[in-house]
Amino acid sequence: MIRNSIFLLLACVISVSTWASDEPKLVSVGIAKSFVPVGFDDNDRVQIGIEGAFADTCFTISATGTTVNEEAKTITLLQSAYHRTGLLCSQLPIPFHQTVNVGVLTAGTYTLKDGVSGRTLGELPVVRAVRPGPDDYIYAPVRDASVQTDGFGGAKLVLEGSFPNTCFFWRDIQVRYYGNVIVALPIVDIRRCENDRCICKTEDVPFEKEVTLNVSQPGSHFLHVRSINGQAINKMVKVRFDDPIDPRG
């Protein structure tokens, strides 16, 4: 009995040692779907979303490589992940999603391809800019964005952030829909002051704005919210109509 216990203990020690010494391997995994916001021009920093699934629970997501062929107008996306083989892995598909920073592109329509399978994932249109700046409008400095549903088929977009002074004011929040992509343009303006006719105070002015969404299909959506100075909020959101209030983001 004692001898069997010793053998069992040694087996456990060897097993734990093997598990602990296992080094993750960097591998490439396939991309199932792309989410492409519409409205980029050739001085924007282009960002898109991708989605896929790992084969088991021992994968950890890593970086997404991008190869841009300007002449052929193709963008090849290669998603990498770390995989451990010494762990007890459940053979279950585990969804993943990622925001990919493609960078500034020349005008044209680009074909997105998965670097593993060679499959076409979609098209990315980039138009010529009509203004020298990165945006057509002045956008609010959005810090976070979320989608909430009310359990009765209604959904709303909530934007949070803060203005750096008291001279910013709201113009409009435009929302555009491209399949399962939601693009929000929080447009603001700045009061023009002459001869001390207005005084802008430099202080933090928090805001929280809500706008009703026209989303009828539940499921995964890619939310792209423009922000000031070419920044953007990008995230995958789950739109569900069976809960009273969905968790934010």
Image (tube, rainbow, N blue to C red):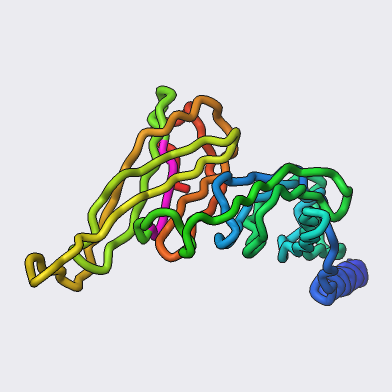
Which residue appears at 83% of the width and 76% of the height?
Answer: 21
Q: Nearer the viewer, residue 11 or 213?
A: 213
Q: Which residue lies most toward the front here?
A: 130
Asked which quadrant contains residue 229, the reply is bottom left
Does the magenta stretch mainly form a helix, a strand or a loop?
A: strand
Residue 237: give x, y in percent of width and height.
53, 44
Q: Nearer the viewer, residue 80 or 172?
A: 172
Which residue appears at 35% of the width and 50% of the height?
Answer: 187
From what the image shows, is residue 181 above or below residue 195?
above
Q: Nearer the viewer, residue 19 or 237?
A: 237
Residue 5 visible: no
User: Which quadrant: the N terminus?
Assistant: bottom right
Residue 179: give x, y in percent of width and height.
60, 33
Which residue appears at 50% of the width and 25% of the height?
Answer: 216
Q: Which residues are magenta?
A: 142-148
* Residue 131 magenta: no
Residue 205 visible: yes
Q: Which residue lies most toward the top here?
A: 152
Q: Is residue 174 left or right of residue 20?
A: left
From what the image shows, is residue 7 above or below residue 127?
below
Residue 27: give x, y in percent of width and height.
85, 63
Q: How many marks?
A: 0
Asked which quadrant contains residue 66, the reply is bottom right
From what the image shows, is residue 24 above or below residue 94?
below
Q: Is residue 66 left or right of residue 209?
A: right
